[in-house]
Amino acid sequence: MRKVSMQRWILVTILFAIFANIAHPVTPRFIKGLGLGDSMFGWAFAGMAFTNFLFSPMWAALTKKWGSVNITVVSLIVYGLSQLMFGYATSASTIMMARLLGGLFVGGIQVSQLTYIVNNADEESKGKTLVNNATMQIVFGTIGYLIGGVIGDYSIIAAFHFQFIGLCVSAAFVFFFVTENPLSTTLERLSLKLMSPFTPFMKSDVNESKFLRNIFIISIVASVASVLYDQTFNYYMADYFNFEPSVNGIIKAITGITALVSNSTLTLWIIKKANISKALGYIFMIVSTLIVALISINNPLLFLVINILYFTIHAAYLPLVQKVVTDSAIDQNTTIGKINALKSLGMIIGAIIAGQGYAISKQLPFILASILFMIIGFMSLFNRKVNE
């Protein structure tokens, strides 16, 4: 009989991180090749983020009845199919259809990744497992970038084919080798109220905790700023510096290694020994300052070095937010749905602003990201006092 294993689940995270990121380095060139305009890359990403945001609470509810494992298997397969649709799209409408479908089921994967840990890890190791999970997403996501970039140098559609096969293999691994603890709750009857991404924020634990409300605000603004930077960085590399997709992949791979070192040392130390809100404040302020330094740089090598520093420091924020939120919440499954919905809402806003802002000025999204990071840096320091 199979036993619950956090090691196997982390391996699932690794597989998903690799194959979910295969198409990212080829997407800017793919969209430019279709002649759809600079803003299309923002709308495509926003489409995926929109359905992710809309249905994350629904996935959180469904995991209570059907389990994180079953949701993950189905979501991996359908997400893979949506990526094939994306790869064969030839118009803005077909791209948006593929991205909307992809966002719906990638939300199922992301929610299940966290609910599995929350429901199956013991209390003593839960914080460490959340950090390991987030770290593996970053590290192996960058490996996916590298593989996708190398494949994309030769064939863009081949990257989408490879991604689909990899996601199906990941689903097979989950189906045959992963199990979870018995489910103990019954499913609420599906309704518009249950599926609404706004309903969970009316729960008493949010209304009664100013600290938790502030963390949610910080989370969504951080997501906006992060997507502003990430999406602009990806497109800027291809558009302004005319780098090949493989260069994007190499840079992501380097940042994955530095993020692994950072999260394995500094982030774990912060969780065990430091005030998380205070640490978040400093992290956001540092990345804001790095973006300011980046804006006036025209040297490609220096541009890449500062980006590596940015991604290394930025990698710490997500596991810290996840830890402080799950520690403060009453219903942890529902809270996971909230956090993923907030992250996705931030992705929608950030992607749209990035696309429209880039069409106005190539540096505007960077400037906005820097301002937002600095604001939530001060908010995090203020929130430390709220919790004292």
Image (cartoon, rainbow, N blue to C red):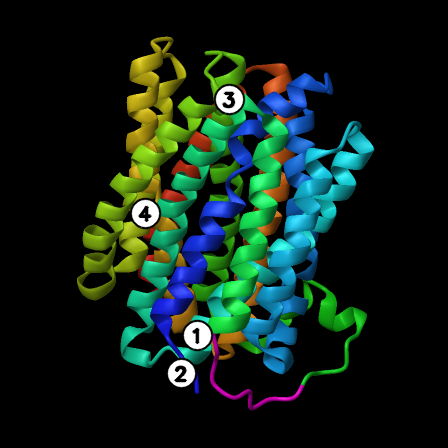
Relative to residue 256, is residue 189 depicted above or below?
A: below
Task: Find numbered disc 4 in the image and state the secondary structure of the residue it sits on.
Answer: helix
Please give the residue where the numbered disc 1 appears in the rendered image: 118
Residue under the point 53% across and 26% down: 152
The alpha-carbon separation of the residues under discs 1 and 4 comes to 26 Å
Closer mark to the observer between disc 1 and disc 3:
3
Residue 232, relative to residue 2: is it above or below? above
What amino acid is labelled 3 in the image? Asp
Q: Amino acid at mark 2?
A: Lys
The tag earlier along the polypeptide, 2 or 1, is: 2
Which label lies toward us, 2 or 4?
2
The answer to whether marks 1 and 4 mark residues whose Cβ atoms lie closer than 8 Å is: no
Q: Which residue is mark 2?
A: 3
Answer yes or no: is residue 38 visible: no
Q: Nearer the viewer, residue 5 or 202?
A: 5
What mark, if any, has residue 281 been given in the picture?
4
Q: Residues within 10 Å of mark 2 (few under 14, many from 20)?
A: few
Dot 1 or dot 4, earlier in sequence: 1
Image spot of residue 83 (x, y percent): 66, 43
* Relative vertical location of residue 136 with respect to residue 287 in this rendering, above or below: below
Q: Quadrant of residue 273?
A: bottom left
- Contact, mark 2 vs mark 4 (Cβ under 8 Å): no
Q: Is residue 180 magenta?
A: yes
Mark 2 residue element: loop
Q: Nearer the viewer, mark 1 or mark 4?
A: 1
Q: Residue furthest top?
A: 298
Residue that mark 3 sits on:
153
Q: Which residues are magenta?
A: 178-186
